[in-house]
Amino acid sequence: MTKPLDNEPLVFSELEKLVAQKITLDIRHFAQSDDADAQVGVTELPAELAEMITQSNLGSVVLFAENFANTEQVVKLTHDLQQAALASAAAKPLIISVDQEGGRVFRFAQGTAFAGNMALGATQNNHGVKLTEQVNTAIVKELLALGINNNYAPVVDVNNNSKNPVINTRAYGDNPEWVAKHGIAATKAIQAQGVMATLKHFPGHGDTYVDSHLGLPRVDHEFAHINANELVPFKQAIAEVKPAMIMTAHIQYPALDSSTFTSKSGEQLIIPATMSRKILHDLLRVEMKFDGIIATDALDMAGIAHFYQPVDAVVATFVAGADLAVMPFKVRKPSDINKFYHFIKQVAAKLEQKIEQAEITQAELEQSLARINRYKVAYINSVELAKTPLAQQQQQAQQVVANTEHLALEQSLMTEAVVLAKTDAKLLPLATAKPKNIHIIVENDLELAALSHAIEQAFHQAQCAKANITALVASKVKVADKASLDNFITSADLVIASINVRTASLVDLGGMDDLLATQFAKEKGTSINYADVVEQQLVKAQQAGIKRIVIARGSPYLMSKYTQLSNVLFCSFDDRSYLHQGQALSPGYNASLAILLGNQAARGVLPVQL
């Protein structure tokens, strides 16, 4: 057993048990000893973490990519997590959460990723919210089969700032009414399958140019503007579909709450929404009548962690009205477990002070826990958790995750979503131009195989003579080779380049644990930047009079350069390439090439103003 605090029996008061049930921990990494590598992903539940869950009465966990190896493994992990929770004094199941939005935020690589919310927004002119319903149904069927009962989705931020680095293609668009329609459809679909939906990020993260993983954003609009834009999707969803959960944003909103706090450095700052009682309790809980769970965004993000001590952050957000404090503490090695027990006790002690100071009442805390437990009863069947054999759960999951129906839907989404952002009437359809030599530019071997397959399939369907294909794979090009790259295009009469255009954010990887890794993973001077390769090749092709096709994956806000350098430009949003039964596939490449060859029309319409 883990050593108790100060060598005394490990005993938690009722308030301390309540605090633990209002905390969500991630279990991304755990080392078996304090001297071992703490960056080992948790794919099997260590005995130490299982005991910690049982002893502490922890209420919730969130999983990341490091926790996902394969379908059977994930089912066993979630099964073991629940057994540890049910063995606690509280005897309550865990809320097991994940960010499975689709597109750029997708944690389980073996699942069906889809192309993200902006791709769904691009289909609304022809399909309304039909594909949003279908895609979210498929995603949560897979989550439920894996033992996950809460999806941190949908994102209902209105992306009305083209420089937004963290929302961007995660948004359905920049029109609040349409974002609301998609958000409502997604929430209905998620909760109809028995998974809790989470609208995020309240009161809105769409009009910022700072990533709250790295700083504290601020929105300076007047209340009338916020009420007519940012708040619209939340208000309509609360009224129509009663979402189980809403996640807060680490953003300053002076028009909603201009009060200040003293940061841990002594600086006076406007309070962020996550810590604002006026925003979480008065606005969301009372005025907007939200009766579900209020969960914070990750409290280890710089928007909070740079300004609050961890204990103070949890106490402040509970006083503000949050039900779940997400990721306020890292357990990465055995010695962290006792520190976490001490952390719970520190939070409870400070909450007692807040109760004495009349900043919060004991009744409010008990109502918060009752709210959490009410949703656990509604969405988590403890009897089934205890009775269904693990092997049966694993077998069922194998039949659901990335099944044929879901993969076909993933392709259907891209078929309807791809936007023809620039066209050349003399070049489309390509079948009439009959190119003999095609040069393709891709980032790696997987993209090469997926794009080559898409070209072959499209040419075959169009009954067009097969062209000769040469390829430049940037991952194999060194700086020393830069001068000779021009040789790749001299014999081509058509160039097809793929480029992933996006503003980098830690949300793509998972969060703050990735910050150091990204800071230290700098280029060593031996590899050439892929965007530079693409630009250089397109410029040379343009100078030589060679026709140029660009398939832009990711943000439409960043396509301007490629509009100038291409004859035909496709926007396929957060498309991905993956292996299926040994074949490399890309739904976006497939759809783009089908349009290029005249096998189908381009039906996607950008849901944002550029």
Image: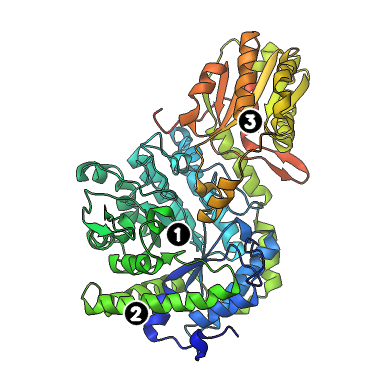
Q: Is residue 215 above or below residue 557?
A: below
Quadrant of the drawing holding the N terminus: bottom right
Is residue 461 visible to us here? no
**Vertical comparison of 15 with 269: above or below:** below
Q: Quadrant of residue 353?
A: bottom left
Q: Quadrant of the C terminus?
A: top left
Residue 464 in picture, x, y percent from top left:
74, 18
Please, what is the three-letter code of the amino acid marked with disc 3? Tyr
The residue singled out by tag 2 in the image is: 349
Callout 1 crowding tier (Cα within 10 Å): few <14, some 14–19, many ≥20? many
What number is the disc on residue 56?
none
Look at mark 1 in the image and give the residue it sits on: 300
In the image as oriented, which residue stretches furthest toward the front? 265
Q: Quadrant of residue 273?
A: bottom left
SS at mark 3 in the image:
helix
Seen from the viewer's position, the closer of residues 315 and 185 is 315
Can you tell which quarter of the image residue 579 is in?
top right
Q: Secondary structure at mark 1?
A: loop
Q: CA distance from mark 1 to mark 2?
A: 21 Å
Query: Local crowd at mark 3 within 10 Å, few (<14), some, or many (≥20)?
Result: some
Mark carried by residue 530: 3
Alpha carbon separation for disc pair 1 and 3: 32 Å
